[in-house]
Image (cartoon, grey):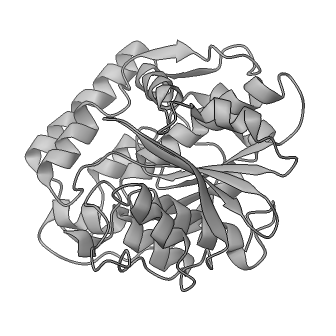
Amino acid sequence: MDLQFNTSGDVVGHVGMTMAAIAYAPGQSAITALLADTTLATAGRWTLVWYGVDDASQVYVARDTVTGQQAVAIRGSVTDSFEEAFWLDWFQEDLSVFRMADWPYGGAPPGAKVSHGSLSGLGSLLRVQDASKQTLVAFLRANRTNALTAVLGHSLGGALSYLLAPYLHQEFSPEQDVLDFWPVTFAAPTVGNGTYAAWLQSQFAASVSRYYNSVDVVPHSWQDLAWIAASFPGGPKMPLAQGRLIDGIRDILKLLKDSYVQPGTGVQLDGTIVVTDDWVQEAGTQHVSATYLSLVGAPPLTSLGSGKAPTTDRGAPPTAR
């Protein structure tokens, strides 16, 4: 049940999505309990070895007790994707898509650009400390392993994986042509332009570990705004407020000549539209981590061992609502 560079039986999807969902759990003790749950795809083999949280971020490192492999899991934003405010915030604010900046940490080819908001999110992750005031980078430096380290997340957590993995690669193996930190993402939006996406695909094998639900809105942000505007054919229509925001984003990106691209074709998970008359509810259902766990064929996270469901957020199971 380790996250080796091998999708045989889709172990990567099962274990990776389970860890990404666990990242939404409310605190260190809840994450520890879920990792110990032998009924989940992680099979009780992974233990928590580092945990950091602040007002903006929650991230943990788990280690496979059999292979010694480590994985870094990043939580997405803590908001309820079944609420209209989530989608208004997403289209207005998330990752500050109207400002692109050159990738500042080296290794990428000339012209590689990412959103300014993505860089801010990465900076936040790098400042998070555990209870002993140790940062993530300091922990990884003190606990180096020769095994491939997965850097994973769902939704915004997945987007940040596309920055954290390259950053860690440059921190520990600058300019080396090795795959030491591997982004494994679920429902991730785009974070950069075509040059950056091509680098993620060629250097970090990002395409084979980019999982997306075919009818989830978020993975189409911000590469295919026309798809979002016409989402859920035969089902609910996008509300006027969101439609106007999409039109505005498209016009501004065109004016700025900013173009966002996903790394490679990815791994498409064939979702099914639940025909309702509420676009927000449909979008929330298609995006939450419970849906992704089901689509990859992994057991659901139904409790934390204390009778409480995971925290409601952008990616929490619907049972948390």
Relative to residue 92, is residue 318 depicted above or below?
A: below
On screen, residue 261 versus residue 54, left or right, reads right
- Spot occupied by residue 236 in the image (x, y as percentages of width and height): 17, 66
Split into 4 quadrants, where in the image is the C terminus?
Answer: bottom left
- Spot occupied by residue 2 in the image (x, y as percentages of width and height): 75, 68
The residue nearer to you, when weighing 217 against 161, is 161
The quadrant in which residue 91 appears is top left
The residue nearer to you, when weighing 254 against 78, is 78
Relative to residue 171, is residue 149 depicted above or below?
A: below
Relative to residue 158, is residue 319 depicted above or below?
A: below
Which residue is painted at 18% across and 41% down in the image?
A: 88
The residue nearer to you, when weighing 287 against 183, is 183
The residue nearer to you, when weighing 318 against 19, is 19
- Spot occupied by residue 45 in the image (x, y as percentages of width and height): 67, 73
Q: How many marks?
A: 0
In this view, which residue lies farthest toward the bottom? Answer: 39
Q: Is residue 111 visible?
A: yes
Which residue is painted at 13% across and 51% down in the image?
A: 84
Q: Is residue 198 visible?
A: no
On screen, residue 147 versus residue 142, left or right, reads right
Which residue is painted at 43% across and 50% down in the image?
A: 155
Which residue is painted at 33% across and 63% down in the image?
A: 316
- Spot occupied by residue 248 in the image (x, y as percentages of width and height): 23, 28
Split into 4 quadrants, where in the image is the N terminus?
Answer: bottom right
In this view, which residue lies farthest toward the front? Answer: 132
